[in-house]
Image (spheres, rainbow, N blue to C red):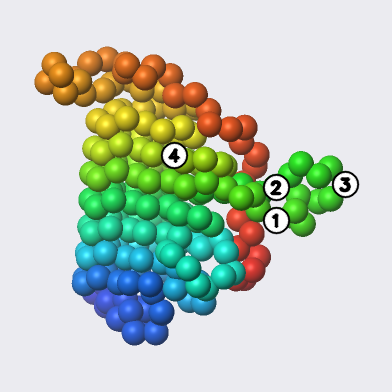
Amino acid sequence: MDLLPRGLTKLYSIWVRLIYPFASIGRNVSFHYTSRVYRPRSTRVSLGNSVSLREYAWLSVATEDPTGEPTIVLEDNCHIGFGSIITAKNRVHLERDVLVGQMVLIVDHNHAYEDITMPIVGQGITEGGTIRIGQGTWIGHGASIICPRGELKIGRNCVIAANAMVMRSIPDYSVVTGNPATIIRQYDPERGAWRAGGREGKIERAADIAPHLNSEAQASA
Protein backbone atom coordinates (compact mmCIF):
# COMPACT_ATOMS: atom_id res chain seq x y z
CA MET A 1 0.00 0.00 0.00
CA ASP A 2 2.96 2.35 0.53
CA LEU A 3 3.85 2.16 -3.14
CA LEU A 4 0.79 4.14 -4.29
CA PRO A 5 1.41 7.35 -2.29
CA ARG A 6 5.11 7.17 -3.11
CA GLY A 7 4.28 6.83 -6.77
CA LEU A 8 1.82 9.73 -6.64
CA THR A 9 4.40 11.92 -4.92
CA LYS A 10 7.01 11.06 -7.55
CA LEU A 11 4.64 11.81 -10.41
CA TYR A 12 3.40 15.02 -8.79
CA SER A 13 6.99 16.18 -8.21
CA ILE A 14 7.81 15.65 -11.89
CA TRP A 15 4.62 17.46 -12.97
CA VAL A 16 5.31 20.47 -10.70
CA ARG A 17 8.89 20.73 -11.91
CA LEU A 18 7.74 20.73 -15.55
CA ILE A 19 4.91 23.26 -15.40
CA TYR A 20 5.66 25.57 -12.44
CA PRO A 21 7.78 28.63 -13.38
CA PHE A 22 9.95 28.71 -10.24
CA ALA A 23 12.63 31.38 -9.96
CA SER A 24 14.98 28.40 -9.64
CA ILE A 25 14.70 24.74 -8.68
CA GLY A 26 17.44 22.25 -7.91
CA ARG A 27 17.77 18.51 -8.27
CA ASN A 28 15.82 15.85 -6.38
CA VAL A 29 13.09 18.20 -5.13
CA SER A 30 10.10 16.30 -3.74
CA PHE A 31 6.55 17.65 -3.48
CA HIS A 32 4.08 15.43 -1.66
CA TYR A 33 0.94 15.25 -3.78
CA THR A 34 -1.03 17.03 -1.02
CA SER A 35 1.48 19.90 -0.69
CA ARG A 36 0.67 23.25 -2.22
CA VAL A 37 2.43 26.04 -4.12
CA TYR A 38 0.21 28.51 -5.97
CA ARG A 39 1.45 28.21 -9.56
CA PRO A 40 1.05 31.86 -10.74
CA ARG A 41 3.19 33.01 -7.80
CA SER A 42 5.85 30.31 -8.01
CA THR A 43 8.03 32.78 -9.94
CA ARG A 44 8.85 34.21 -6.49
CA VAL A 45 10.00 30.86 -5.05
CA SER A 46 13.57 29.51 -5.19
CA LEU A 47 14.32 25.89 -4.22
CA GLY A 48 17.72 24.24 -3.84
CA ASN A 49 18.75 20.62 -4.23
CA SER A 50 17.05 17.84 -2.25
CA VAL A 51 14.30 20.06 -0.83
CA SER A 52 11.15 18.26 0.27
CA LEU A 53 7.61 19.35 1.08
CA ARG A 54 5.74 16.77 3.13
CA GLU A 55 2.00 16.19 3.44
CA TYR A 56 -0.13 19.36 3.31
CA ALA A 57 2.89 21.68 3.47
CA TRP A 58 2.25 25.08 1.85
CA LEU A 59 4.58 27.69 0.38
CA SER A 60 2.47 30.84 0.18
CA VAL A 61 3.70 33.95 -1.68
CA ALA A 62 1.76 36.87 -0.21
CA THR A 63 2.09 39.23 -3.16
CA GLU A 64 0.34 39.23 -6.52
CA ASP A 65 3.38 40.72 -8.30
CA PRO A 66 5.00 37.86 -10.27
CA THR A 67 8.21 39.84 -10.85
CA GLY A 68 11.12 40.65 -8.59
CA GLU A 69 13.40 38.68 -6.30
CA PRO A 70 12.15 35.46 -4.68
CA THR A 71 10.19 35.96 -1.49
CA ILE A 72 10.65 32.33 -0.41
CA VAL A 73 14.13 30.80 -0.60
CA LEU A 74 14.84 27.25 0.55
CA GLU A 75 18.47 26.24 0.18
CA ASP A 76 19.76 22.69 -0.27
CA ASN A 77 18.40 19.88 1.90
CA CYS A 78 15.60 21.84 3.59
CA HIS A 79 12.60 19.76 4.67
CA ILE A 80 9.15 21.21 5.38
CA GLY A 81 7.03 18.98 7.59
CA PHE A 82 3.39 17.92 7.65
CA GLY A 83 0.94 20.84 7.58
CA SER A 84 3.61 23.54 7.88
CA ILE A 85 3.14 26.93 6.22
CA ILE A 86 5.76 29.39 5.00
CA THR A 87 4.16 32.62 3.85
CA ALA A 88 6.23 35.59 2.68
CA LYS A 89 5.57 39.04 1.32
CA ASN A 90 9.17 40.26 1.45
CA ARG A 91 11.61 37.42 2.17
CA VAL A 92 11.71 34.20 4.14
CA HIS A 93 15.08 32.54 3.61
CA LEU A 94 15.99 29.12 4.99
CA GLU A 95 19.66 28.30 4.73
CA ARG A 96 20.76 24.76 3.94
CA ASP A 97 19.89 21.76 6.12
CA VAL A 98 16.99 23.42 7.97
CA LEU A 99 14.46 20.93 9.32
CA VAL A 100 10.93 22.28 9.79
CA GLY A 101 8.69 20.02 11.89
CA GLN A 102 4.95 19.53 11.72
CA MET A 103 2.34 22.33 11.82
CA VAL A 104 4.93 25.13 11.91
CA LEU A 105 4.06 28.70 10.86
CA ILE A 106 6.75 31.00 9.41
CA VAL A 107 5.42 34.39 8.29
CA ASP A 108 7.02 37.77 7.55
CA HIS A 109 3.89 39.93 7.77
CA ASN A 110 0.56 40.30 9.52
CA HIS A 111 -2.95 41.32 8.62
CA ALA A 112 -3.64 45.01 9.22
CA TYR A 113 -6.21 45.66 11.95
CA GLU A 114 -5.77 49.27 13.15
CA ASP A 115 -8.78 50.78 11.30
CA ILE A 116 -11.68 49.95 13.60
CA THR A 117 -14.23 51.19 11.02
CA MET A 118 -13.37 48.37 8.63
CA PRO A 119 -13.53 44.60 8.96
CA ILE A 120 -10.02 43.21 9.39
CA VAL A 121 -10.49 40.99 6.35
CA GLY A 122 -10.73 44.14 4.20
CA GLN A 123 -7.64 45.91 5.53
CA GLY A 124 -5.00 43.96 3.65
CA ILE A 125 -1.62 42.92 5.01
CA THR A 126 1.11 44.96 6.66
CA GLU A 127 4.42 45.97 5.10
CA GLY A 128 6.03 43.18 7.08
CA GLY A 129 9.70 42.37 7.55
CA THR A 130 12.17 39.63 6.62
CA ILE A 131 13.14 36.30 8.17
CA ARG A 132 16.40 34.36 7.78
CA ILE A 133 16.88 30.98 9.45
CA GLY A 134 20.43 29.75 9.82
CA GLN A 135 22.00 26.58 8.52
CA GLY A 136 21.24 23.37 10.38
CA THR A 137 18.42 24.73 12.54
CA TRP A 138 15.57 22.49 13.71
CA ILE A 139 12.08 23.93 14.24
CA GLY A 140 9.81 21.78 16.37
CA HIS A 141 6.13 20.87 16.08
CA GLY A 142 3.68 23.76 16.31
CA ALA A 143 6.30 26.52 16.58
CA SER A 144 5.58 29.98 15.14
CA ILE A 145 8.17 32.40 13.76
CA ILE A 146 6.55 35.74 13.03
CA CYS A 147 8.11 39.02 11.89
CA PRO A 148 5.51 41.81 11.55
CA ARG A 149 8.28 44.33 10.76
CA GLY A 150 12.03 44.71 10.72
CA GLU A 151 14.48 41.83 10.42
CA LEU A 152 14.36 38.54 12.29
CA LYS A 153 17.41 36.27 12.17
CA ILE A 154 17.72 32.83 13.72
CA GLY A 155 21.32 31.68 14.01
CA ARG A 156 22.80 28.44 12.81
CA ASN A 157 22.18 25.10 14.51
CA CYS A 158 19.43 26.47 16.75
CA VAL A 159 16.60 24.44 18.25
CA ILE A 160 13.14 26.03 18.29
CA ALA A 161 11.18 23.86 20.71
CA ALA A 162 7.65 22.62 20.09
CA ASN A 163 5.00 25.37 20.32
CA ALA A 164 7.57 28.15 20.82
CA MET A 165 6.65 31.66 19.66
CA VAL A 166 9.65 33.50 18.16
CA MET A 167 9.38 37.18 17.27
CA ARG A 168 12.97 38.34 17.75
CA SER A 169 16.40 37.36 16.49
CA ILE A 170 18.23 34.45 18.14
CA PRO A 171 22.03 33.94 18.25
CA ASP A 172 23.81 30.85 16.95
CA TYR A 173 23.63 27.53 18.80
CA SER A 174 20.65 28.44 20.97
CA VAL A 175 17.80 26.31 22.30
CA VAL A 176 14.60 28.31 22.82
CA THR A 177 11.18 27.47 24.18
CA GLY A 178 8.00 29.17 25.39
CA ASN A 179 5.82 32.15 24.50
CA PRO A 180 7.54 34.54 24.22
CA ALA A 181 10.56 32.42 23.35
CA THR A 182 13.32 32.20 25.96
CA ILE A 183 16.83 30.85 25.55
CA ILE A 184 17.17 27.87 27.89
CA ARG A 185 20.51 26.57 26.62
CA GLN A 186 23.28 27.99 24.48
CA TYR A 187 26.69 26.87 23.24
CA ASP A 188 29.51 29.17 24.35
CA PRO A 189 32.27 29.06 21.72
CA GLU A 190 34.72 30.79 24.08
CA ARG A 191 34.39 28.03 26.67
CA GLY A 192 33.74 25.29 24.13
CA ALA A 193 30.76 24.06 26.17
CA TRP A 194 27.00 24.34 26.52
CA ARG A 195 25.57 26.54 29.27
CA ALA A 196 22.14 26.90 30.79
CA GLY A 197 20.27 29.98 29.65
CA GLY A 198 22.03 32.42 27.35
CA ARG A 199 23.87 35.66 27.33
CA GLU A 200 20.92 37.15 25.51
CA GLY A 201 18.51 36.09 28.27
CA LYS A 202 14.83 36.33 27.43
CA ILE A 203 14.07 37.12 23.81
CA GLU A 204 11.99 40.28 23.75
CA ARG A 205 9.05 40.61 21.40
CA ALA A 206 9.92 42.52 18.24
CA ALA A 207 6.42 43.94 17.88
CA ASP A 208 2.91 43.45 19.12
CA ILE A 209 1.32 40.52 17.37
CA ALA A 210 -2.13 40.64 15.84
CA PRO A 211 -4.05 37.55 14.81
CA HIS A 212 -2.56 36.58 11.45
CA LEU A 213 -4.89 36.04 8.53
CA ASN A 214 -3.34 34.88 5.31
CA SER A 215 -4.89 36.88 2.51
CA GLU A 216 -3.64 34.48 -0.16
CA ALA A 217 -5.96 31.81 1.19
CA GLN A 218 -8.80 33.82 -0.30
CA ALA A 219 -6.94 35.00 -3.41
CA SER A 220 -5.95 31.50 -4.46
CA ALA A 221 -9.06 29.62 -3.28
Q: On the image, numbered disc 3 is attached to which residue?
A: 117
Can residue 28 be spotted in the picture?
A: yes
Residue type, numbered disc 4? Leu
Which one is in front in this view, the residue at disc 4 or the one at disc 2? Answer: 4
- Secondary structure under tag 2 reads loop
Percent position of residue 3, x then y? 24, 74
Q: On the image, numbered disc 1 is attached to which residue?
A: 124
Q: Are marks 4 and 1 in contact (CB under 8 Å)?
A: no
How many C-alpha atoms fall within 10 Å of the one at disc 4: few (<14), some, or many (≥20)? many
Q: On the image, numbered disc 2 is attached to which residue?
A: 112
Near-viewer residue (143 or 191): 191
Q: Are marks 2 and 1 in contact (CB under 8 Å)?
A: yes
Near-viewer residue (70 or 14): 70
Tell me: residue 58, above or below residue 176: below
**What residue lies at 61% left-to-right and 36% top-to-bottom?**
209
Q: Alpha carbon of mark 4 to alpha carbon of mark 2: how far?
A: 19 Å
Which label's residue is closer to the chain start, 1 or 3? 3
- Secondary structure under tag 3 reads loop
Instruction: Return the residue found at the far left.
Output: 192
Quarter location, residue 201: top left
